[in-house]
Amino acid sequence: MKKLVFIDACVRQDGSRTRRIAEPVISALAVRYEVVRYDLTEMEGIVPLDPKLFGERGQGSIPSWAVNAARDIAAADRIVIAAPFWDMSFPAALKCFFEQTSLFDITFTDNGETCVGLCKAPKVLYITTRGMDIPTGDPREQATPYLRSLGSLWNLGELTVISAWNMDYSSAGEIEEKISTCIAEGQEIVRNW
Ligand SMILES: Cc1cc2nc3c(=O)[nH]c(=O)nc-3n(C[C@H](O)[C@H](O)[C@H](O)COP(=O)(O)O)c2cc1C
């Protein structure tokens, strides 16, 4: 079975609208993929590289969870990221996860002239919800460009975005409608994904 890595950065956990969209999409994908889940809210060690961690990395000592996660990412056939829109991007926990798993000779290497990605997933799905009236592609939306850029470092393929926006300024009914629309969109996308 092909392997899918699901990175869940939904800090509000079961209260998260983003997670409500992601879960049925992951369930649909689980029929065809072995799903390896990284629920960042349940993990220890999701911290930025501080001088100690950085120094240890220089000595070749890297937390085993980070090495394993980086290997999973590099070997994955598909990657799904669920993260709410925070401070015009995504929660810092997700950046910390990337910082710890962006590992030389696992997710990328170099060819003497520049960095070369070692991942192989041709498709990445990013699911998010935003509080303000900011659609995907708006210059104020800095999560998608970052994920695309990291994908170029790691050699990830096409990035598809499922998003709902203006969530904090919509009625309860409108919010439910937006979530349902995103779930339907997700089901449609993953049918041939
Ligand atoms: C800490 C925090 C920061 C946020 N920053 C932004 C922001 O910069 N722009 C925005 O449009 N919404 C922002 N929001 C609103 C969320 O994007 C919105 O409520 C989203 O639907 C939350 O997703 P969730 O239900 O999956 O947690 C923020 C919410 C929180 C809790």
Image (tube, rainbow, N blue to C red):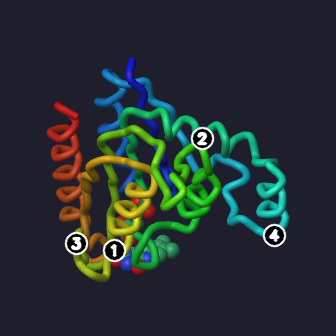
- As drawn, the residue found furthest toward the top would be 1
Which callout, 2 or 3, points at the residue further toward the start of the chain?
A: 2
Ligand 1 rendered quadrant: bottom left
Q: Which residue is drawn at 48% across and 46% down?
A: 7
Badge 3 local density, few (<14 within 10 Å), some, or many (20+)? few
Q: Distance between the residues labelled 2 and 4?
A: 22 Å
Secondary element under disc 3, as helix, strand or loop, is loop
User: For mark 4, what is the residue?
Assistant: 51
142 or 164: nearer the viewer: 142
Secondary element under disc 2, as helix, strand or loop, is helix
User: For mark 3, what is the residue?
Assistant: 137
* Kind of residue at disc 2: Ala
Q: Distance between the residues labelled 3 and 1?
A: 15 Å
Which callout, 3 or 4, points at the residue further toward the start of the chain?
A: 4
Secondary element under disc 1, as helix, strand or loop, is loop
Q: In which quarter of the image is residue 137?
A: bottom left
Q: Where is residue 157 in the image (x, y as percent from the top left)?
A: 31, 47
Q: Distance between the residues labelled 2 and 3?
A: 29 Å
Q: Distance between the residues labelled 3 and 4?
A: 35 Å
Task: Specify whether tag 3 is near ligand 1 (CB below 8 Å).
Answer: no
Q: Which residue is drawn at 31% across and 30% down?
A: 29
Q: Residue at x 34, y 59 (%)?
A: 128
Foreground: disc 1 or disc 4? 4
Task: Specify whether tag 1 is near ligand 1 (CB below 8 Å).
Answer: yes
Q: Where is residue 36 in the image (x, y as percent from the top left)?
A: 50, 32
Q: Residue 131 carries which label?
A: 1
Badge 2 local density, few (<14 within 10 Å), some, or many (20+)? many
Q: Where is residue 155 in the image (x, y as percent from the top left)?
A: 40, 49
* Kind of residue at disc 1: Gly
User: For mark 2, what is the residue?
Assistant: 69
